[in-house]
Amino acid sequence: MTAPEPAAVESYALALAMCAGRFVDAVESEDPDRVLAEFRQASTLTAPPGVNPELAWSVVLAAQVSTERPLRSRLAWVADVGIETAA
């Protein structure tokens, strides 16, 4: 397998970061329809050859997590959409 083109990776990372910012904002707004819309928008991005899109999305999202807020606070919104947590 060949290495991904650096310019393509940089462009993809920037697009993912923009989508992730909107996705995080949608989550914090506690609007499930907007969360789904932003997730679907991010899912339309095409990763360059050699880039794992699931891993890239996970890394970009993780980079936006504030570790200053307790886990329970970060996950409080999931009860509103019916997701059970152990936190």
Image (cartoon, rainbow, N blue to C red):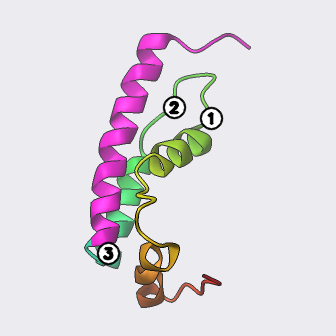
* Left or right of 24 in this view: 43: right
- Is disc 3 placed on a helix, strand or loop? helix
Q: Which residues are magenta?
A: 1-28
Amino acid type at circle 3 is Asp
Labels 2 & 3 near each other (Cβ < 8 A)? no
**In terms of secondary structure, where does tag 2 sit?**
loop
Numbered tag placed on residue 52 in the rendering: 1
- Write down the quadrant of residue 14 in the picture: top left
The disc, 3 or 1, on the residue closer to the chain's N-terminal end is: 3
Q: CA distance from mark 3 to mark 1?
A: 26 Å
Quarter of the figure that contains the C terminus? bottom right
Depicted 9 relative to depicted 62: above or below: above
The majority secondary structure of the magenta stretch comes to helix
Position above or below: 47 against 6: below
38 to 17, vertically: above or below: below
- 82 inside magenta stretch: no
Q: CA distance from mark 2 to mark 3?
A: 25 Å
Residue hosting label 2? 47
The residue located at (47%, 21%) in the rendering is: 9
Indicate yes or no whether the magenta region holds residue 21. yes
Check disc 2: other Cα within 10 Å, few if <14, some if 14-19, many if 20+: some
Q: Outermost residue, front direction?
A: 68
Q: Position of residue 27 (x, y in %)?
A: 34, 69
Q: Earlier in the sequence, mark 2 or mark 3?
A: 3
Residue 38 found in image quarter = bottom left
Residue to which mark 3 is pinned: 33
Which badge, 1 or 2, is on the more N-terminal residue? 2
Residue at the image position 39 percent from the left and 39 percent from the top:
16
Q: Is residue 59 left or right of residue 24?
A: right
The kind of residue on which mark 2 rests is Ala
Total labels: the figure holds: 3
